[in-house]
């Protein structure tokens, strides 16, 4: 099956992300309870409201394409391995940031085709900022009702190098490599916004050595690649999706300057 108009699909998915973001902000404006999932990560009613809006919307848009969401991820690999195309969703990326009320949380929706993230939408509700990307067709950013503008990664990298890292997870491994990257500026940022800063050229590098799941990265991965950057494993090979039973990513690098030998810098 082919999708005849990916651009139109991207617009529809962006509108869906915006609806989900509005539901999240409705919860954000009030007091809310926080529960713990089996892995001890936080869960709020905002996660579930966003999940329902997105799943219902995608099911109407493309009823023939299966959906894997963080909040409904118990689909056996025996079933998933036969999917050539599917939606990969994080209804509320950065729940810890949401709970701490620092605004750095996102809605992430990606289309995966043959293990590759080909379409990505990341919406930052508190900033009313939408990032979108179609691999090989370009990436864009829209703030509020302003005109949408094309974004590109920065190449060559800036001096000092601007590195983004997790706000909620310390990374002792990264600290071992930082001397190789000097001079640099290290900026803590929450959720998939880190990828988006690389995509728009305001950051150069995001190395990730801590745990992430495939729904955390896929949408912003597509945007980075559509903007001219790359998301790779430490050996330099592309980060891929739905290739194994577990849904955890390996360590990876996100960068804008594809001419620089980042893998060599991060070799063990």
Image (cartoon, grey):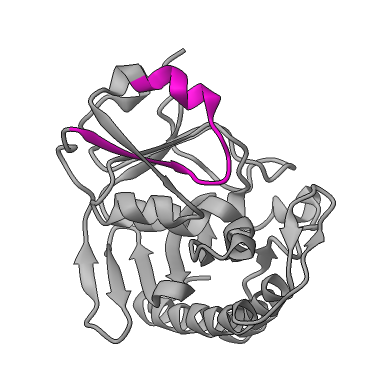
Q: Is residue 7 left or right of residue 15?
A: left
Residue 255 x %, y % = 32, 40
User: Is residue 90 in sight in this rendering?
Assistant: no
Residue 154 x %, y % = 19, 46
Residue 65 x %, y % = 62, 71
- Residue 4, by quadrant, is bottom left
Q: Residue at x 23, y 25 (%)?
A: 183
Q: Residue at x 40, y 73 (%)?
A: 127
Q: Is residue 132 left or right of residue 37?
A: left
Residue 136 x %, y % = 29, 58
Q: Is residue 266 magenta?
A: no
Q: Compared with residue 64, is residue 157 higher up or lower down, i.e. above or below?
A: above
Q: Compared with residue 258, is residue 191 higher up or lower down, i.e. above or below?
A: below
User: Is residue 110 in sight in this rendering?
Assistant: yes
Q: Is residue 177 magenta?
A: yes
Highlighted range, magenta: 160-178
- Name the foreground residue: 55 vs 245: 55
- Name the foreground residue: 184 vs 240: 184
Q: Residue at x 58, y 60 (%)?
A: 93
- Residue 95, by quadrant, is bottom right
């Amino acid at each position: 099956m082919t999708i005849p108009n990916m651009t139109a699909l991207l617009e529809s998915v962006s509108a869906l992300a915006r609806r989900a973001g509005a539901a999240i902000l409705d919860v954000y404006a009030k007091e809310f309870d926080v529960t713990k999932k089996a892995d001890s990560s936080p869960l709020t009613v905002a996660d579930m409201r966003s999940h329902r809006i997105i799943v219902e919307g995608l099911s109407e848009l493309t009823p023939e394409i299966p959906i894997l969401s963080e909040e409904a991820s118990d689909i056996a690999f025996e079933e998933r391995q036969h999917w050539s195309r599917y939606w990969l969703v994080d209804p509320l990326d950065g729940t810890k940031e949401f709970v701490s009320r620092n605004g750095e949380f996102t809605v992430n929706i990606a289309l995966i085709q043959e293990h590759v993230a080909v379409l990505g939408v990341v919406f930052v509700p508190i900033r009313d900022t939408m990032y979108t990307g179609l691999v090989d067709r370009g990436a864009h950013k829209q703030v509020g009702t302003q005109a949408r503008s094309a974004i590109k990664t920065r190449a060559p990298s800036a001096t000092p190098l601007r590195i983004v890292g997790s706000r909620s997870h310390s990374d002792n491994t990264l600290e071992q490599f930082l001397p190789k990257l000097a001079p640099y500026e290290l900026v803590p940022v929450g959720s998939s916004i880190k990828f988006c800063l690389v995509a728009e050229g305001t950051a150069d590098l995001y190395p990730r050595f801590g745990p992430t799941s495939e729904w955390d990265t896929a949408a912003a991965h597509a945007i980075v690649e559509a903007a001219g950057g790359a998301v790779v494993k430490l050996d330099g090979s592309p980060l891929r999706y739905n290739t194994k039973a577990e849904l955890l990513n390996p360590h990876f690098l996100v960068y804008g300057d594809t001419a620089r030998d980042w893998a060599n810098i991060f070799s063990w």
